[in-house]
Image (cartoon, helix red, strand yellow):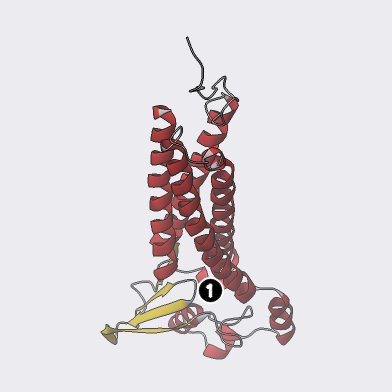
Amino acid sequence: MKGLLVLYLVALAISITSTALNVASVAQVRWIKQTTPASIPLRLSTQYGLFTKCTTSSLDPQTTRCVPFPKRGVDCGKSSGRDYDLLLGVSAGQTAATVTSGGDGDDEAEDRWGFCDNWVAAGYAHQLSLAFALGNIVALSLTLWGTATVGRGFRTDKLRSGWKLVAGLMTLQAVCMCVSTSLVAYEFHHNERFEHGAHLGRAWREGVVAYALNLFVVIVLLLTRVTGQLRMVPGEDGYEPISHGSTA
């Protein structure tokens, strides 16, 4: 029993850590960071979050301008959001029209399901993961309480078998975070706006660590169940309540 209490305590600590990373990654505008090369006279530093984009210019380095992101008609389509391509092209002697030229048909095709759709889906998936995270902390707390109060007159058999709900909620949380980080990584590697001076940021890494921790706990719970250590319900492992009416 003590071993199971330790297991659930560790699982609760990891779950709280994972949830903290989850919240931090949603709140931060550090999923992708992009900076213009030093050869460009006008330096721009842009950080992309799931719902916000913040830009700092060398013209006014003390001011950071943040706007909602992405915006339909501004950030969607292949030729949208290519500020860095424009700067690089102008620096190389090209005209702005040449750098930003693109067929309307391409933008229309891109808008059927493109950058904005993937980015918005990533944001919603990450928000949904928070709901599963909070539910998991509640389920873990109740399971821990049921394990600690065994044999004290409480109907705790359901609580003590709550590891199934815990594993399910942690898996759903991990899946949602995996979807969000994967969509952002896909756009980072395939979208033209991130071709120059961009790298995945701290918030993205925090999301990856969070769902990795969740999957680790789920695997440990499943392995513990397979080895018979989670047979908690009375009678399942040979345990029978003591009959107080028996005589020697």
For label 1, the crowd category at 10 Å Cα-Cα, with few meaning under 14, some 14 to 19 and many 20 or more, is: many
Q: Is residue 83 visible?
A: yes
Relative vertical location of residue 26 with respect to residue 18 in this rendering, above or below: below
Say left or right for 137 vs 179: left
Foreground of the two, 161 or 207: 161
Q: Residue furthest top?
A: 248
Total numbered circles: 1
Mark 1 residue type = Arg
Relative vertical location of residue 93 with respect to residue 21 in this rendering, above or below: below
Residue at left 54%, top 58%? 132
Say left or right for 107 vs 228: right
The answer to which quarter of the image holds residue 205 is bottom left
Residue 123, percent across and down?
54, 69
Question: Which part of the image, by quadrant, shows the N terminus?
Answer: top left
The answer to which quarter of the image holds residue 117 is bottom right
Residue 119, percent across and down?
57, 71
Residue 22, percent across and down?
44, 59
Residue at left 57%, top 30%? 225
Foreground of the two, 133 or 149: 149
Relative vertical location of residue 82 with respect to residue 199 in this rendering, above or below: below
Numbered disc 1: secondary structure: helix
Residue denoted by label 1: 193
The answer to which quarter of the image holds residue 60 is bottom left
